[in-house]
Image (tube, rainbow, N blue to C red):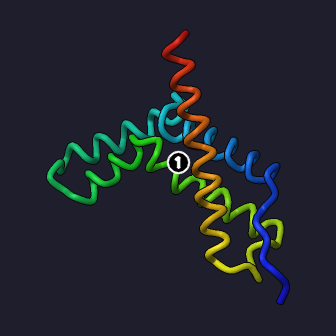
């Protein structure tokens, strides 16, 4: 078995951008307002439910959603390009941290620039 290699910086950067954009879509974009509104209404029916509270916290947090969305995007990319098999899961875990970190960094820059405007 050959040495495991991480994705190159270009792939990681593009996956980070995709993670950022998908997170913005899930948490903020108006196109998904009806879905988020339904989830909030579902939560209000039983606000004491830990599971419902978890879902609301997840869909409201760019860091929480960003983590899982970045993982899904990375896994999809690795599977679609045939790069998942044969590489230790630890390497993919490091890639996941890199993609999620890039997405969060872009989100922070976006937030900062938005406050300055």
Residue at 57% x, 37% y: name it: 25
Quarter of the image for residue 52 reads bottom left
Residue at 17% x, 51% y: name it: 46
- Furthest-left residue in this view: 48
Where's residue 75, x and y in %? 67, 65
Query: Quick one: 39 or 50, which is closer to the camera?
Result: 50
Residue linked to disc 1 = 66
Where's residue 93, x and y in %? 60, 68
Query: Quick one: 36 or 19, which is closer to the camera?
Result: 19
Q: How crowded is mark 1: few (under 14 residues within 10 Å), some or many (20 or more)?
A: many
Give the vertical position of 114 relative to 28 (above or below). Answer: above
- Furthest-top residue in this view: 117
Where's residue 39, x and y in %? 35, 45
Residue at 22% x, 58% y: name it: 50
Q: In which quarter of the image is the C terminus?
A: top right
Q: In which quarter of the image is the N terminus?
A: bottom right
User: Left or right: where does residue 114 sit relative to residue 16?
Assistant: left
- Furthest-front residue in this view: 3
Query: Quick one: 91 or 33, which is closer to the camera?
Result: 91
Where's residue 56, x and y in %? 33, 46
Residue at 61% x, 61% y: name it: 96
- Furthest-bottom residue in this view: 1
Quarter of the image for residue 7 reads bottom right
Numbered marks: total: 1
């Amino acid at each position: 078995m050959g040495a495991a290699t991480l994705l190159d910086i270009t792939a990681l950067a593009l996956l980070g951008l995709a993670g950022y954009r998908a997170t913005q879509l899930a948490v903020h974009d108006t196109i998904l307002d009806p879905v988020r509104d339904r989830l909030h209404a579902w939560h209000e029916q039983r606000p004491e439910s830990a599971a419902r509270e978890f879902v609301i916290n997840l869909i409201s947090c760019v860091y929480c959603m960003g983590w899982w969305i970045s993982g899904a995007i990375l896994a999809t990319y690795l599977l679609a390009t045939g790069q998942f098999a044969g590489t230790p899961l630890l390497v993919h875990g490091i890639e996941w941290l890199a993609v999620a970190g890039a997405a969060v960094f872009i989100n922070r820059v976006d937030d900062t620039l938005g406050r300055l405007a």
